[in-house]
């Protein structure tokens, strides 16, 4: 693995984190806990919009990496054209569903004390515009990952990450209306789609000398191949983000929108410690896929080396964050935080460590084309997690949500590793 690829990924992940650390306290102070809680829900909803990609972006990365390893790159333009049409259609369907949900009273499901329902309704409708852009961006990003164009992805991620936090902050100086805050998020997602598409087409132009725009044609056979892998990824793409994001929605519903802030602030801080894991695993997935075709005797030692490195590194990070959590939150938020957030953050650190190890096995199973295994694991976990989350919230509040999240991450890692070893690697 080229360290340059990891470095670019880190650059694309770290800089938005630094911007978030500066922006979030100012944003909370400017718009208040209640509106910030709803803005956090909007971020979660946009993240969850990745399900409308239907797993096609991941399938595209795996398929294109495999084709490159087999020296059959003449089929790559067809794969891209087919994948992009599928995700565009899915995104438009999802967008229509969200608009209908908003028009028929969906805003009433969010408990607020001071925010008008029409403001929430308008915000939901605006979010619907971002869904097709988010879905198609995942597909074009998958194309860039297959060609290891992490430099282009990372530069765009920095810009998008900056706008994600700085955009609402700048608007908050003029208006605290939630719809205006979310409008900045929508605009950034549409712009990101256009850039991701340009980068994906550039990968073809720069790496495939025989490529012409006429090669970008839809293929039913290719669609079936993508769905054979992506169909299972779709299951994971629906269930996994649901389990990641459901806690904040249930907190808003069962407790209050303001309580979301108590949970989300330490969650966002702790989750950002996974940036290096994300930087490594996103490179490992296409690299392993290609390596399994080109050098089948080498990929196992390559994977084990990085598994040990990531596990050791994240164990140290988790322990340090547990010890320093009270001081980090105090300095970051200048003392303006609920003490419960400290306990929440410390519990979440345990889940982050488990997730870092699990992410490596997840990449391995997908590189081997075993997306059905990860999907079935998520299907098994979903009812267990939601049941535990519900009762944990009832008895322990936001601390219970952290307990449920970390327990689910531990179970996920155990099941992923056991299934990977059953395949004898």
Image (cartoon, rainbow, N blue to C red):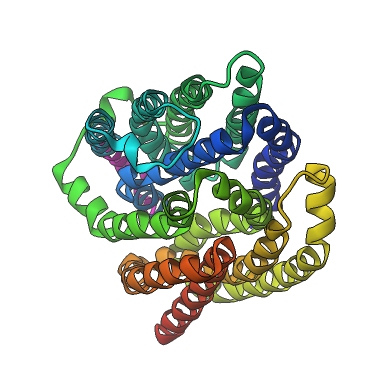
Q: Is the magenta stretch mostly helix, strand or loop?
A: helix
x and y percentages locating residue 376 in the rendered image? 31, 71
Q: In this view, does 44 lie to the left or right of 211?
A: right
x, y percent for residue 392: 49, 70
Residue depicted at 50% across the width and 80% down the height: 414
Image position, residue 360 (x, y; %)? 55, 67
x%, y% of residue 425?
46, 80
Q: Is residue 403 left or right of residue 292?
A: right
Tell me: residue 304, above or below residue 289.
Answer: below
Q: Work out whether residue 59 or residue 49 is closer to the camera in this orientation and state it.
A: 49
Instruction: Compare residues 206 and 19 and report the one nearer the observer.
Output: 19
Q: How many labels does the image show?
A: 0
Is 17 a magenta residue? no
Q: Is residue 383 above or below residue 422?
A: above
Residue at screen point 41% across, 64% down: 366
Q: In this view, does 51 lie to the left or right of 259?
A: left
Whether residue 114 can be seen here: yes
- Which residues fall within the magenta stretch? 66-83
Query: Residue 213 falls in which quadrant of the image?
Result: top left
Residue 17 left/right relative to 330: left
Please tell me whether residue 125 is drawn above or below residue 282 in the rendered image. above
Residue 82 drawn in magenta: yes
Query: Height in image: 351 above or below 137?
Result: below
For the N terminus, give its image quadrant: bottom right
Residue plotted at (57% across, 21% down): 176
Query: Is residue 155 in view from this perspective?
Result: no
């Amino acid at each position: 693995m080229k360290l340059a690829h990891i470095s670019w990924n880190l650059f694309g992940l770290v800089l938005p984190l630094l911007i978030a650390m500066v922006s979030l306290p100012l944003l909370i102070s400017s718009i208040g806990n209640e509106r910030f809680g709803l803005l956090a829900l909007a971020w979660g909803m946009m993240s969850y919009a990745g399900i409308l990609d239907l797993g096609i972006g991941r399938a595209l990365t795996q398929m294109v990496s495999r084709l490159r390893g087999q020296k059959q790159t003449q089929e790559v333009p067809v794969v891209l054209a087919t994948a992009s049409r599928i995700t565009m259609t899915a995104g438009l369907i999802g967008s229509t569903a969200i608009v209908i949900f908003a028009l028929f009273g969906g805003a009433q499901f969010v408990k607020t004390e001071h925010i008008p329902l029409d403001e929430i309704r308008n915000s939901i409708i605006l979010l619907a515009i971002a869904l097709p852009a988010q879905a198609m961006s995942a597909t074009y990003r998958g194309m860039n990952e297959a060609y290891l164009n992490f430099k282009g992805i990372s530069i765009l991620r920095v810009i998008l990450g900056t706008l994600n936090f700085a955009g609402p902050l700048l608007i908050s100086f003029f208006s605290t209306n939630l719809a205006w805050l979310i409008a900045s998020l929508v605009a950034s997602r549409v712009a990101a789609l256009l850039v991701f598409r340009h980068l994906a087409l550039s990968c073809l132009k720069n790496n495939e000398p025989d490529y012409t725009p006429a090669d970008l044609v839809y293929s039913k056979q290719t669609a079936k191949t993508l769905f054979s892998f992506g169909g299972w990824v779709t299951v994971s793409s629906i269930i996994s983000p649901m389990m990641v994001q459901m806690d904040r929605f249930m907190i808003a519903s069962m407790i209050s929108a303001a309580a979301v802030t108590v949970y989300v602030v330490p969650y966002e801080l702790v989750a950002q410690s996974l940036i290096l894991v994300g930087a490594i695993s996103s490179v490992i997935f296409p690299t392993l896929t290609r390596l399994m075709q080109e050098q089948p005797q080498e990929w196992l030692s390559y994977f084990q080396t990085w598994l040990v490195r990531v596990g050791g590194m994240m164990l140290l990070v988790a322990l340090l964050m547990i010890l320093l959590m009270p001081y980090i939150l105090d300095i970051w938020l200048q003392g303006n935080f609920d003490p419960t957030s400290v306990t929440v953050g410390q519990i979440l650190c345990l889940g982050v460590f488990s997730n870092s190890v699990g992410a490596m096995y997840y990449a391995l199973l997908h590189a081997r084309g075993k997306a059905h295994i990860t999907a079935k694991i998520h299907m098994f976990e979903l009812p267990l997690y939601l049941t535990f989350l519900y009762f944990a919230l009832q008895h322990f509040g936001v601390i219970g949500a952290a307990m449920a999240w970390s327990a689910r991450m531990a179970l996920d890692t155990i099941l992923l590793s056991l299934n990977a070893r059953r395949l004898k690697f």
